[in-house]
Image (cartoon, rainbow, N blue to C red):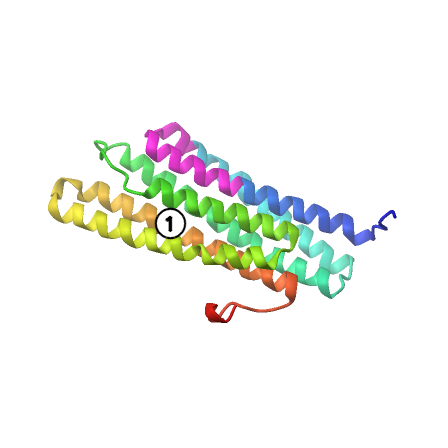
Amino acid sequence: MTDHLRPIDHDLNRLRDKLLMLGGRAETAIAQAIRALVERDSELAEQVIRDDDKIDQLENEVDELCIDILVLRQPTASDLRFVIAAVKTAPAIERIADHAVNIARHVLRLNQEPQLKVYFDIPEMARIVQQMLLDGLDAFTSHDAEKALETIRHDDHADALYKRIYDELIHLMATDSSTVRRGAELLFIIKHLERIADYVTNICEQIVYMARGEVIKHREWPEL
């Protein structure tokens, strides 16, 4: 049986594709910023900063398309939830990219100092955060509320790593005063990663709303 496409379907598909592109660029920015950290690659860090303009432009395109759909297409209830979720998700993705840019700026400052021999579990924390974003985008595409909820639960792992790395850095800085400046930069970096995980959680909450019409923002997780 051939599916009948409504006029709105073309715009909704474009909106989904633009959001996925936006998310993909944000994930790339995180990956490049962390690679710049580990490899002390200032040129790559500067590229992350330069590429942010393209992400901002893409977010604007998402906003414009959402407005066009709302004004011109008169979406049904389920389509309206999708558009509302997109309206709230695009700024969250853009802020994720901003955090990647901030990481890149800290990398540039770190690269002006002697290298610390250890980066603790920062690459592992970044890997978890990147996977959360990828899983969240996949859940958005498939309207998969269960996957969104599972992704939210991974935020606990990111938080636990944040606390452990934070404690290790504080100990290092307290026992070796020569590491304070570099340790402070690394503290900022892990805070940016922790905030990225929070934004992914917000995106996944929007996915549950889109798929089920449920608002779960302040729900206690044992009830889920």
- Using the image as rendered, state which of residue 218 and residue 161 is in the foreground: 161
Please provide percent x and percent y for residue 54. Answer: 55, 39
Question: What is the magenta segment's predominant secondary structure?
Answer: helix
Q: x, y (%) of residue 14?
A: 70, 46
The residue depicted at 60 percent of the width and 69 percent of the height is: 214
SS type, badge 1:
helix
Which of these two is toward me, 203 or 136? Answer: 136
> Where in the figure is residue 113, as x and y percent of width and height?
22, 33
Q: Can see residue 134?
A: yes
Residue placed furthest toward the right: 1
Q: Is residue 42 magenta?
A: yes
Taking 122 as reference, is 167 left or right? left
Q: Residue at label 1? A: 192
- Residue drawn at x 77%, y 51% as measured from the top left: 9
Q: Is residue 92 left or right of residue 118?
A: right
Tell me where the magenta segment starts and ends, as one range.
25-46
Query: What amino acid is found at the position of numbered circle 1 in the picture?
Result: His
The residue drawn where x is 23% and y is 44% is: 183
Taking the magenta stretch, the answer to whether it contains residue 69 is no
Identify whether 72 is placed above or below 108: below
Say which of 208 and 85 sits in front: 208
Q: For mark 1, does the 10 Å Cα neighbourhood hold few (<14), some (14 to 19), or many (20 or more) residues?
A: many
Q: Residue at x 52, y 50 (%)?
A: 93
- Percent from the top left, x then y, of residue 204? 54, 57
